[in-house]
Amino acid sequence: MEPVRNKDHPRIGIIGGGQLAKMTALAGLQLGCDVIVLERSSASPAATLALHSIVGDWNDPEVLLQLAAQSDVITLENEFVDAGALRVLEASGARLLPTAHSIALTQDKFVQKSTLAEAGLPVSAFRMVASTQDIHDAGREYGWPVVLKTRRNGYDGKGNFTVRSAADAATGWENLGAGKAELFVEAFCSFDRELAAIITRARDGSSAAYPVVESVQRDHICHVIKAPASLPADVGARAAELARRAVAAVGGLGSFGVEMFLMVDGSVLINELAPRVHNSGHYTIEACECSQFENHVRAVLGWPLGSTRMIVPAAVMVNLLGVDKGSGWPAGLNGALEMPGVHVHIYGKAHAGRGRKMGHVCALGTDPTQVLSRANSAAEMISFGGQP
Amino acid sequence: MEPVRNKDHPRIGIIGGGQLAKMTALAGLQLGCDVIVLERSSASPAATLALHSIVGDWNDPEVLLQLAAQSDVITLENEFVDAGALRVLEASGARLLPTAHSIALTQDKFVQKSTLAEAGLPVSAFRMVASTQDIHDAGREYGWPVVLKTRRNGYDGKGNFTVRSAADAATGWENLGAGKAELFVEAFCSFDRELAAIITRARDGSSAAYPVVESVQRDHICHVIKAPASLPADVGARAAELARRAVAAVGGLGSFGVEMFLMVDGSVLINELAPRVHNSGHYTIEACECSQFENHVRAVLGWPLGSTRMIVPAAVMVNLLGVDKGSGWPAGLNGALEMPGVHVHIYGKAHAGRGRKMGHVCALGTDPTQVLSRANSAAEMISFGGQP
């Protein structure tokens, strides 16, 4: 039986039904909101939490208008929705937050980077490339290696290729579609560490900055988040300020993830930003007074933002990635549940796949080294698909 | 579109769809479980979070069997379901936790009290009454006032009547049905304070005790919970141990709420227990390493129990009760959202009613007095139905 909506309660439409939509929905439900989910398939982590679930193509304006008819405000959990379709949605009078303009400025990584550079924000050198010759030229100018990227639809290392030398340029070119997709190239950043920060920006342009965290990647996927990053206070403050300015530069609204490079000389570069809640902010559910998800809900509804303060000295999040194809339900859960101060999140996906994000653990405590060790131990116990 | 279930994920059936079911569902969903809700109406706080929602009479064994067909384990959010119907459910092979036997021992408050007394637990004097004369006799023996109670279906002061003197006995008798419902009488406890503790008991008989809290009632409804209660360590330990023994005495499984009286001489009496998650444990969502709701899910699924430790020195929960009939959406929310360290829960009920539980706030911090003041301020800003 379909549940009945409460007519006075805000209805949040979410484009996408994955784990980011699910965690946003959990935050909204606690605040009494109803959630409507649009996904391409009927089995999605967020679908069971939704008042209604719409199955359809989110690039189809007709489908987006169906979602709008049931929602007071619409947001999204990914940046791959066609900005043109989103503009049709806005033209219909629907309230989309962040706006189609913000999505357009971020979903094309060349446009994003140009926008950040024009706002005076520090980014690595970059330019469009239309041939292997252009890659050679960039390598000569920037020095090798260089990073070749598709303008659109790249994530978790997909759509990226590190070109180590001139001899490697043709391989990179072929690997990313040999010109079928528009490509650009960046100078390689030999960074000391990767940092990230969640910024939630409100309708009035004010923003709340979460602690700057250290992001440890494995195979180009966010693997471990250490919160807060161990940094000199001035470096942390500078990174947070750059992250705020980056989100403002694209006119962001709601929670955005900003990835940064900390260079050996202590300078900070913006790597890229995502116009949505972000994996680097999952720790905020347990570790902060108001999570990135609750603050996103507050921002899109025009409510006051909550405090981003950590309530414990240290938190570590570790992603649970699929080992191989298999069940969406893990082995080894009990061992992890026995560890005090460790919170386990299972996303509820139907199937595991190699490298697929299936859940995460978050450990809280006072000593960062112990917290990291506990989070890693818990994560190692749990496995999705195949043998760990 | 109805969402699709993930076949490997545990399915928890919940009898009842109110705020206790909703908060249990939120905990289960985070752990990747699916939830099936049975309620008498289609609009309920937990229905939108459910994979499926069944609308029907929970005292009808046929309806309970429908729920069982879709669930791996069944639990309940209230103790008013007919124990006979629950026995039919168990006889069908369904796993009900807590068991029909536990529910039978607790839903009849006379049986409950007898069970606790037989287990050697301290309770106030009590006996069955079948006439106003019996009330007079009890008053003479125990001293006035005495508390007249219905054996079944009492909660939040409903089904209770304090008989102040012999002259009052007839009024109490009439007020509670003049013998239509079976009644018993208890000696009045002139307690110093009311205490409560959540105990989660696992399948192997081990149990996890949450901190003993102080419960401040208003009009017989739990109004404020101060966690932890300010108590000498030995009194707190004794109360926790009594609570553990009380839940064991009724063969409890899952999270149970135990209400106690702290007497002026420092002794502790058990008042009553509820075979379910309890209003006095809502603070555990934000204040404890593992909430009463998550531990309930873990217990019914046979998983290891989580730590009940508080992660902050002080937490205060204040209930948000309806002022009058009106919308299920509150006025004054923004002011409360602006207060740091205050978590707001809106249950998502369709309508407010006078005294109806519509939500709660929970404030965390280090100084109990400041935390209480912040929680009260936030709660006073929010109003459901009518003018505050």
Image (cartoon, coloured by chain):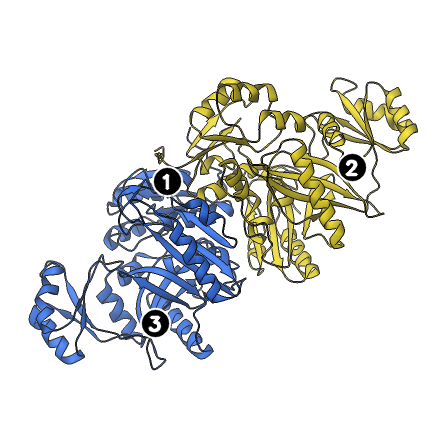
Chain colours: A blue, B yellow
Tag 2: amino acid: Pro
Decide if residue A380 is in sight here.
yes
In this view, the residue in front, B325 or B81, is: B81
Mark carried by residue B348: none
- Cα distance in 3D space between marks 1 and 3: 37 Å
B274 relative to A71, above or below: above
- Cα distance in 3D space between marks 1 and 2: 49 Å
Viewer-side label of 2, 3: 2
SS of the residue at dot 2?
loop
State yes or no: discs 1 and 2 in contact (Cβ < 8 Å): no
The answer for which chain carries disc 2 is B
In this view, the residue in front, A349 or A337, is: A337
B60 relative to B31, above or below: above
A69 relative to B233, above or below: above
Residue denoted by label 3: A193
Residue denoted by label 1: A47
In this view, the residue in front, B54 or A193, is: A193
Q: Is residue B356 left or right of residue B146?
A: left
Across and down, in percent, residue A309 comes to 52, 64
Residue denoted by label 2: B122
Q: Earlier in the sequence, mark 1 or mark 3?
A: 1
Q: Are marks 1 and 2 on the same chain?
A: no
Tag 3: amino acid: Arg
Q: Is residue A111 left or right of residue B237?
A: left
